[in-house]
Image (cartoon, rainbow, N blue to C red):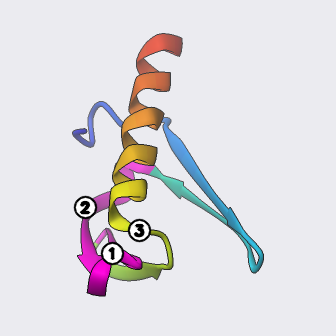
Amino acid sequence: MTKDHAQGVFIRFIDFRGELLLRASAIDGVVPVDKSTATYIYLNGTRLTVEIPYQHVCEIISEAEKARQVNG
């Protein structure tokens, strides 16, 4: 997903601690952390750690992009 295509796409992560809302166009990249139990999300040069497996984060981003294309 490129930043141009991700304009207006927001991704919401919810867990027992609360909610995290990210603009997809702010995501520079995602990298797995030890044994896929967490993921680093790079946002405009800042590293954010989420306790969500890397594969799941990638699927969420992919689904958000598909939704944007359908609603586009």
Helix, strand or loop for disc 3: loop
Q: Secondary structure at mark 2?
A: strand
Q: Which residue is mark 3?
A: 53
CB atoms of marks 2 and 1 within 8 Å: no
Highlighted range, magenta: 24-44
Q: Which residue is mark 2?
A: 28
Q: Residues within 10 Å of mark 1 (few under 14, many from 20)?
A: some
Say whether residue 18 is left or right of residue 72: right
Q: Residue furthest front?
A: 35
Depth order, front residue of 72/62? 62
Magenta span: chief secondary structure: strand
Marks 1 and 3 in Cβ contact (< 8 Å): yes
Percent coordinates x, y for residue 6 in the rendering: 36, 37
Q: What residue is drawn where x is 41% and y is 79%?
A: 37
Q: Residue at x 33, y 57 (%)?
A: 55
Q: Considering only vertical position in the picture, is 62 above or below 49?
A: above
Residue at position x 41%, y 57% from top? Answer: 57
Q: Nearer the viewer, mark 2 or mark 1?
A: 1
Amino acid type assigned to the residue bearing label 2 in the image: Asp
Q: Would you say residue 51 sits in the magenta stretch?
A: no
**Quadrant of the image occupied by residue 39:** bottom left
Q: Give the CA separation, mark 1 to mark 3.
A: 5 Å
* The disc label shown at residue 25, or none: none
- Between 30 and 4, the residue placed more toward the observer is 30
If you read the primary sequence from the N terminus, does the residue marked by circle 3 or circle 2 appear first?
A: 2
Work out which quarter of the rendered image holds the N terminus and state it: top left
Q: Amino acid at mark 3?
A: Pro
Report, in whole angstroms, how far the alpha carbon at label 2 lies from the one at label 1. 19 Å
Up/down of 8 relative to 53, above or below? above
The answer to whether one can see residue 18 in this image is yes
Q: Rounded to the nearest whole Å, what is the CA distance between mark 3 and mark 2?
A: 18 Å
